[in-house]
Amino acid sequence: MIDFAGKSRAVEFRSLTFLNCEVHLMTKPRTLFEKVWDAHIVRQPSDEPALLYIDLHLIHEVTSPQAFDALRENGRGLRRPDKTVATVDHNVPTIDRSLPIADLVAARQIEALRRNCSQFNIRLFDIDSSQQGIVHVIGPELGLTQPGRTIVCGDSHTSTHGAFGALAFGIGTSEVEHVLATQCLLQNQPKTMLVEVIGTLPEGVSAKDLALGIIKIIGTDGGTGHVIEYAGEGVRSLSMEGRMTLCNMSIEAGARAGMIAPDEKTFSYLKGRPFAPDDTRWDIEVAHWQTLTTDREACFDRVVRVNARAIEPHVTWGTNPGMVVPVSGVVPDPNETANDADRCATQRALEYMALAPHTRIEDIKIDRVFIGSCTNGRLEDLRAAARVVKGYRIGDSVRAMVVPGSQTVKRAAESEGLDYIFREAGFEWREAGCSMCLGMNADVLAPGERCASTSNRNFEGRQGRGGRTHLVSPEMAAAAAITGHFTDVRDWHFK
Amino acid sequence: MIPFRIHTGLVAPLDRANVDTDQIIPKQFLKRIERSGFGEFLFYDWRRLPNGEVDPSFPLNQSKYNGTSILITGKNFGCGSSREHAPWALSDYGFRAIIAPSFADIFANNCLKNGLLPVVLEEQEVATIFQRARELNGYQLTVDLERRVVIDRENFLASFPINDFQRECLMAGLDDVGLTLRHDADITAYERHRGH
């Protein structure tokens, strides 16, 4: 019952159910997710959702103003300012920060967050903070993200934090209000899915390619209603940055959360970070964190197995992350799809993307390159891209941009000279923020422009109305910037 | 929250799967700090041609669907960004219920907090409604939350799943936060027990 991703065109995914699992309430083996879930139940009436305690609430400028307004309208207070942390990331400019924000509506939203944080006594990593950055980059960086915690944020990519063995998921603004007022959420218990990655990824293939490969297998709604646990050698061998990329993309498979059991890599990443447990608490916390693994006999509602050796660098060709092929592949033909619905969707996507069926992926020329986002804006991502870029110039007709995920990432990259490598090659080197991942600030594609992007969504208009987004890894984005078209980074001549 | 018990309204078809929240409300409209006024920006890019003119082929631009309050659409509706601006825009435009074979988790949650009912029906049932909404003029459905059914004036009858708790909250227009605050003592006890 093992399903391998890769060359086989046969059914690549099967769902296993374990309805016959024996349940012994006292000694029932539990998954990592169940251990974290159980430890946070405040109350669980039999016919209602659980009331779940939230350890960390991250907020940003776009999805919080209406929640604070509701608190004020209803005369409610903020229960735990000490468990609430704010930053500005979604619509901040990535150019010169000493200038006033030109977009007055964005400035008003940022100002509202400042006012709210000041009124409710919330710690804010503001635009001029040396630790400002994308909320899902700074949480781990600051050591706020810890194994076993429940973490929420009004942003779907909160799943990123699951890389540390936290239960982390995105919420809407009404739920933001709920957490502000009660430090809890009403939640129905999701189902569990195990994605086991067998073997390790080949050279030149990254966590991003693995994430896209998994979405290709299970579909953009394959994880709906589930929390995914990623396990196996292919996951254990990933760095913390790679694990964050993988968990980040869980939402693109429809799962609200992805989780990875913490291990020595997790502990050594966290040690010494500003909000990590200090020396007096460290050993006690680590001993607890070490219990956060799925028990051997625990059952999942679904199991998917993926062969890491068969994963290739991926490039999306369509308008959702499931519309993806290996770089060695071609643009699909709508007439070769399984059913009418797929044919229509493929046709529509190809029309939007201005691509002809059977075009070789490596023959697709690009205009823009974006390296950054909560998916791939961390130091390791910039290092991987810089290694490809070193000694080259970007293509004549290409405009390329690197937007570090945080000011901390930016400083670290600069101290290693990565900014120099990018600038020498013709890249723009920007300030930290979400930037062109969602194009809420001035960083957008012009209509018809084609972009190789390390972000997470290739939806119509996501990076600018009429813009055409292809999702790739940082290495693949860097290679495309140099050659002006998608290029298999496994064949790259590093200088 | 406006209570939802039973609603009868004109049905508009949007025959696409995986409609993401970026399409429902594009990001340039997320900078508002109010909850209201998002309706005019609903499906903004799809309602307009690249030259900015209204696209007559988009269903919501057709006079036939003026005054619609029930949307019938494809699977995985509302995927992508967690922006609650999506249900705000749909509600503000006048929708009270969305019918689809499946919904993205966060979007469905957000709808329930805003008195907008996500109704999950079987693919075949959805196909029947699509056909009638396209072919008949003024095609209406009744969504009855109390009985958990969708019916029309012909012979269509389909039941939909929704858990008791969510149903009660919607029917009474209950505010979650108010409900949870009743359990303040439990939360405090939890915090003490856990050393928070």
Image (cartoon, rainbow, N blue to C red):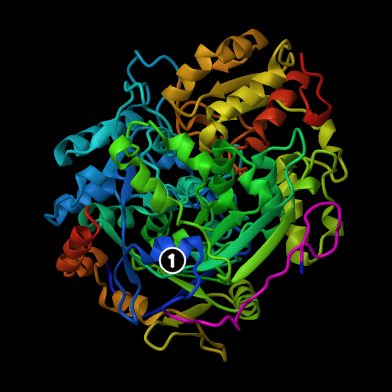
- Where does residue A48 sit, x and y in percent of width and height? 33, 77
- Where does residue B58 sit, x and y in percent of width and height? 59, 56
Task: Judge by depth and name the residue closer to the eye, B170 or B61.
Answer: B170
Residue under the point 65% across and 19% down: A386
- Where does residue A2 sit, x and y in percent of width and height? 77, 65
The secondary structure that dominates the magenta segment is loop
Q: Give yes or no for residue A152 being in the magenta stretch.
A: no
Q: Is residue B132 visible?
A: yes
Q: Taking A66 as reference, is A205 above or below it? A: above
Mark 1 lies on residue: B67
Corner quadrant of residue A193? bottom right
Label 1 Cα neighbours within 10 Å, binned few <14 / some 14-19 / many ≥20: some
The three-letter amino acid code for the residue at tag 1 is: Gly
Q: Which stretch did the figure color magenta?
A: A2-25
Task: Judge by depth and name the residue closer to the eye, A490 or A235.
Answer: A235
Residue A102 relative to residue A494: left or right = left
**Given the image, what chain letter belongs to the residue carrying mark 1?**
B
Corner quadrant of residue A15? bottom right
The N terminus of chain A, quarter of image? bottom right
Residue under the point 57% across and 34% down: A376
- Where does residue A375 sit, x and y in percent of width and height? 55, 38
Task: Judge by depth and name the residue closer to the eye, B14 or A11.
Answer: A11
